[in-house]
Amino acid sequence: MLKEISKDNPAVLADYLQSRAQEISADILLKVTEILNDVRTNQDEACKKYTKQFDHQDIETFKVSPEELDAAIQQCDPAFCDAMRQAKKNIEYFHRAQVRQSYILQKEKGIYLGQRVLPLDSVGIYVPGGRAQYPSSVLMNAIPAHVAGVKRIVMVTPPDENGSIHPNIAFAAQLAGVTEIYKIGGAQAIAALAYGTQQIPAVDKIVGPGNIFVAAAKKLVYGKVDIDMIAGPSEILVVADEKANPRHAAADLLSQAEHDPMASAILLTTSRTVLDAVNDELKKQSVKLPKREIVEQSLANYGKAIVCDSIEECIHFANEIAPEHLELMIEDPMKYLGQVRHAGSVFMGYYTCESIGDYFGGTNHVLPTSGTARFSSALGVDSFIKTSCFLHYTEEALQAYGPQIMTMAKEEHLDAHANAVKVRMENE
Ligand SMILES: NC(=O)c1ccc[n+]([C@@H]2O[C@H](COP(=O)([O-])OP(=O)(O)OC[C@H]3O[C@@H](n4cnc5c(N)ncnc54)[C@H](O)[C@@H]3O)[C@@H](O)[C@H]2O)c1
Ligand SMILES: N[C@H](CO)Cc1c[nH]c[nH+]1
Ligand SMILES: [Zn+2]
């Protein structure tokens, strides 16, 4: 059942948004800092100790061998492998269009300047291994890195109860072009990727979702390495007009509610009849779901609805909420896309359920949550590149513009800067 928020009471919406702001407690930060320092000092020995303590596994060699990888992949369902291969094609197709070009500009007097686009040398992908496995997330993280041209794509994931890698995760890693896999999870995996150990060489950037210990560790190692984002619980916001099918809208809301008791599912509609019918459908459909308990908690905590006067008003509230996923279950969604300012990813029309994007459509499913779509973007090729500028002045150009450069340097009282120009302008 979605709890209705009156559109005339913005304070309630503000409270709701505040309740979703993610903060990591001081206790967790302290505990994770200890793990990070221990791994930094004692390297593999500390990694083994925490893997024993938290994952209950004695791992001597963290790296997954080619034989172990092949043996795991043999266990995968061929239909799953075929679907993954098609998903890979779609994800690659979308992300190839994101590739940015280097450029060079030529000016008067022999001046040229430009910018090179360079892939990162190495990235680490964290793949959660606790409560659920998400091979689709391996594709979403590794494919853009591969398309960007990253040579070393390292995956870390906790060992399973037999000390092995999950077969579907192994298949996804091989399909997506992961170059090294290590069986290690939690904050100790993030520390190993950031600082390096005898067995696990460090990387330049760490991406991928994980639990609170992983999130805290990513936050703390930022600066030593880059990170993508701190992804919070999943969110879906459906904008439905009077023609939207309530059964479909309810199914979509439930598809994200099943991720987490803290996931959020919101309906904004121009029709009270649609809201009532969606609520009936939520009741009917949720009892049939294996994750019924999670779904019910999620809807009780974060299931909300607003009845609006127009689609424009729905989009106004959607922009306030800045959801991870926004479904436009309306006629002519293209007409309204331009009004959407803040959403991680938009799903257009009556037939584009969000699950298509989670698995198969090609757009990335690693998206900003908790309102951070106001200022950040989906994971993509840009997440795996950096740029480097270059500039060239001839003697003629320096003679022409040197005085202006020296004037600026002197105003900043930086005489040595001015002097670097002056010594070149003087005829020796
Ligand atoms: N946004 C997304 O795209 C997306 C996708 C997949 C998963 N997720 C999220 O990722 C998270 C996965 O969490 P998970 O726990 O299932 O897997 P995880 O791999 O993130 O965490 C398991 C690791 O946590 C460490 N750990 C466990 N208990 C600990 C303790 N008491 N102290 C220190 N370390 C401890 C262990 O080392 C273990 O290896 C979920 O919150 C899920 O919603 C998000
Ligand atoms: N919807 C999730 C991100 O919020 C991603 C995912 C993976 N598998 C299924 N869904
Ligand atoms: Zn999902």
Image (spheres, rainbow, N blue to C red):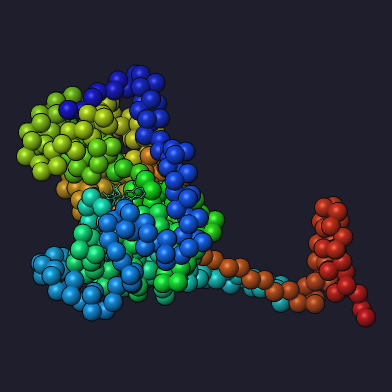
From this view, report whether residue 293 is shown above or below residue 12: below
Q: Is residue 385 left or right of residue 257?
A: right
Whole-percent x, y for residue 7 in the image: 32, 22
Viewer-closest of 161 and 336: 161
- Residue 68, by quadrant, is bottom left
Whole-percent x, y for residue 263 in the image: 27, 39
Residue 137 can be seen in this image: no
Whole-percent x, y for residue 58 in the image: 29, 64
Give the tally of numbered discs: 0
Q: Is residue 299 left or right of residue 289?
A: right
Which residue is found at the position 29% from the left and 43% from the top?
A: 234
Viewer-closest of 186 and 426: 186
Name the image quarter holding the N terminus: top left
Which residue is found at the position 10% from the left and 43% from the top?
A: 290
Residue 386 can be seen in this image: yes
Residue located farthest toward the right when viewing the structure as drawn: 428
Q: Is residue 292 left or right of residue 96?
A: left
Whole-percent x, y for residue 349 in the image: 21, 45
Which residue is found at the position 17% from the left and 33% from the top?
A: 296
Q: Is residue 74 left or right of residue 363?
A: left
- Residue 364, by quadrant, is bottom left
Which residue is found at the position 37% from the left and 30% from the top?
A: 19
Name the image quarter holding the C terminus: bottom right
Viewer-closest of 162 and 83: 162
Viewer-closest of 179 and 328: 179
